[in-house]
Image (cartoon, rainbow, N blue to C red):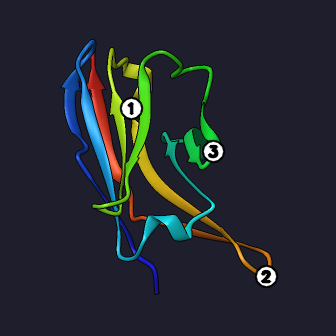
């Protein structure tokens, strides 16, 4: 059973930075894609950033401020968040996708990010 464990959330002032980590219990190379989603109260979960062997992608709202990366030796995916805004406040979830006999999604438990104004 694959496990994804997020860490790095917390409280930060607007304009500050945080780095989220997502540690996988197995090799991250086994995932076709890995990404970060977020969900604010009353909102649907939305894709923030994704990384595949072909590159990276970002939501328009975070382009130029957030960077997704991965370290295969540590089986960890990161989300560097700079110039944080109060509207970035949400629970951030790590996601991994495997395309084996269909699409399988794996999720972490989430980590809270709160940006104060």
Could you say which disc has been placed on residue 11 in the image?
none
Secondary structure category for the residue under label 1: loop
* Residue at position x 55%, y 45% in the image: 51
Q: Which residue is mark 2?
A: 101
Residue 81 x, y percent position in the rendering: 34, 28
Q: Quadrant of the C terminus?
A: top left
Residue 56 x, y percent position in the rendering: 58, 36
* Residue at position x 57%, y 43% in the image: 50
Number of numbered callouts drawn: 3
**Precedes in sequence: disc 1 or disc 3:** 3
Q: Which residue is mark 1?
A: 89
* Residue at position x 20%, y 26% in the image: 12
- Separation of disc 2 and disc 1 at Cα? 36 Å
Q: Are marks 2 and 3 in contact (CB under 8 Å)?
A: no
Secondary structure category for the residue under label 2: loop
Residue 43 x, y percent position in the rendering: 59, 40
Decide: few, some or many residues near mark 3? Use Cα within 10 Å; few <14, some 14-19, many ≥20: few
Q: Which residue is mark 3?
A: 44
Q: Is residue 51 left or right of residue 9?
A: right
Decide: few, some or many residues near mark 1? Use Cα within 10 Å; few <14, some 14-19, many ≥20: many
Q: Is residue 2 left or right of residue 61?
A: left
| Frontmost residue, 34 versus 12 | 34
- Separation of disc 2 and disc 3 at Cα? 27 Å
Residue 71 x, y percent position in the rendering: 34, 52
């Amino acid at each position: 059973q694959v496990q994804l464990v997020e860490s790095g959330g917390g409280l930060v002032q607007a304009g500050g930075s945080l780095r989220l980590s997502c540690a996988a219990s197995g090799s991250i190379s086994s995932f076709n894609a890995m990404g970060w989603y977020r969900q604010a109260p009353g909102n649907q979960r939305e894709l923030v950033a994704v990384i595949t062997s072909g590159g990276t992608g970002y939501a328009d709202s975070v382009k130029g401020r957030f960077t997704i990366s991965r370290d295969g030796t540590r089986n960890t995916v990161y989300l560097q968040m700079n110039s944080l805004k109060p509207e970035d406040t949400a629970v951030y979830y790590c996601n991994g996708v495997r395309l084996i006999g269909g699409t399988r999604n794996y999720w972490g438990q989430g980590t809270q990010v709160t940006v104060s104004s």
